[in-house]
Image (cartoon, rainbow, N blue to C red):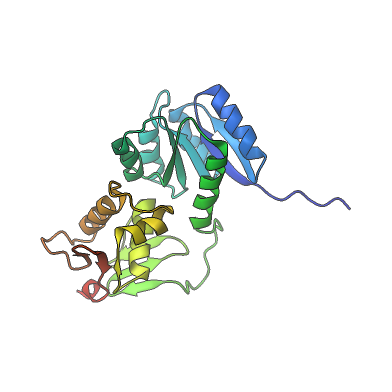
């Protein structure tokens, strides 16, 4: 009896350079990925809804709609991990991509082995793709009026659902799981993106600022997510009971 081939992870590649798209597609297909290619930004949303990929690889420069806007629109309805491809080495462009919802980026020219490693890393950090949630979420975190459900990536605050972007949810979960402990930017960034803080990356700081705005914690001395000067950030479990 012939052994069935292992199922592959469906990946959506949004890239308008035909040669590069073909090279990336063929390389990833040689591993545990099955790649569908879309060559225009304005077709990305429909493709994600149709193919339900576990990973989107998104070029920054696309016809009809650029990668920034594509990512922004995907985040309105999907938490699928987004790996952005960019030829721009300006750190501010990279940060902008992360702030609109990308989870990581790879610089062009693309090194295929790096792309595979980054894709695997994102899938390891992504939640299970099962559509049926368990009856009881044993990992649920509750702090007063704040409820966090890791299994279905849901957040409720004062009885209302809070829609968070992927980076925002991951950041909140990292902080909440370490409630009462000070986490440095290096600690957070390693968990968030698997890299060390280089002194320039503002992903953590900007993410903290967005979370504070969402949860009414924008006073001069925030109480829910505290800044511990010279050390990092602290998620205060008691502050959410108010």
Q: Please identify the quadrant where the C terminus is shown.
A: bottom left
| Left or right: 108 in relation to 145 | right
Residue 51 appears anywhere in the view: no
> Could you tell whether 66 is left or right of 240 in the image?
right
Q: Residue furthest left?
A: 220
Q: Residue at x 39, y 52 (%)?
A: 166
Q: Nearer the viewer, residue 21 or 241?
A: 21
In the image, 14 versus 203, the foreground residue is 203
State whether residue 227 is above or below residue 205.
Answer: below
* Image coords of residue 218 (percent x, y): 15, 59
Question: What residue is drawn where x is 48% and y is 30%?
Answer: 109
Q: Is residue 157 visible?
A: yes
Q: Is residue 23 above or below residue 75?
A: above
Count of numbered circles in the view: 0
Q: Residue furthest right?
A: 1
Residue nearest the viewer, comparing 134 with 20: 20
Quarter of the image for residue 129 reads bottom right
- Seen at 44% across and 54% down, the residue is 194
Residue 171: image location, x then y, percent: 35, 58
Above or below residue 119? Residue 212 is: below
Q: Looking at the picture, does residue 103 appear above or below residue 190?
A: above
The percent position of residue 2, horizontal first and vertical second, equals 86, 50
Q: Residue at point 89% right, 53% down?
A: 1
The quadrant in which residue 21 appears is top right
Say which quarter of the image contains residue 140: bottom left
Residue 36: image location, x then y, percent: 59, 35
């Amino acid at each position: 009896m012939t052994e069935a081939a292992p199922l592959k992870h469906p990946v959506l590649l949004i890239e308008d350079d035909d040669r590069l798209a073909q090279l990336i597609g063929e390389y990833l297909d040689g591993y545990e990925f099955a790649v569908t290619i879309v060559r225009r930004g304005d077709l990305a949303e429909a493709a994600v809804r149709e193919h339900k990929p576990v990973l989107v690889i998104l070029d920054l420069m696309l016809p009809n709609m650029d990668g920034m806007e594509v990512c922004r629109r995907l985040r309105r309805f999907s938490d699928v991990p987004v790996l952005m491809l960019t030829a721009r080495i300006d750190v501010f462009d990279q940060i902008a991509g992360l702030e609109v919802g990308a989870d990581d980026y790879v610089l062009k020219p693309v090194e295929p082995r790096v792309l595979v490693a980054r894709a695997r890393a994102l899938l390891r950090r992504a939640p299970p793709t099962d559509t049926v949630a368990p009856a009881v979420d044993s990992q649920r975190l509750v702090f007063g009026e704040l409820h966090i459900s890791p299994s279905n990536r849901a957040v409720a605050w004062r009885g209302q659902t809070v829609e968070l972007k992927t980076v925002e949810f991951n950041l909140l979960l990292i902080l909440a799981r370490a409630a009462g402990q000070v986490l440095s930017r290096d600690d957070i960034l390693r968990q968030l993106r698997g890299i060390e803080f280089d002194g320039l990356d503002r992903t953590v700081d900007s993410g903290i600022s967005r979370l504070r705005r969402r949860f009414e914690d924008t006073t001069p001395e925030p109480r829910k997510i505290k800044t511990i000067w010279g050390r990092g950030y602290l998620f205060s479990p008691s502050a959410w009971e108010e």
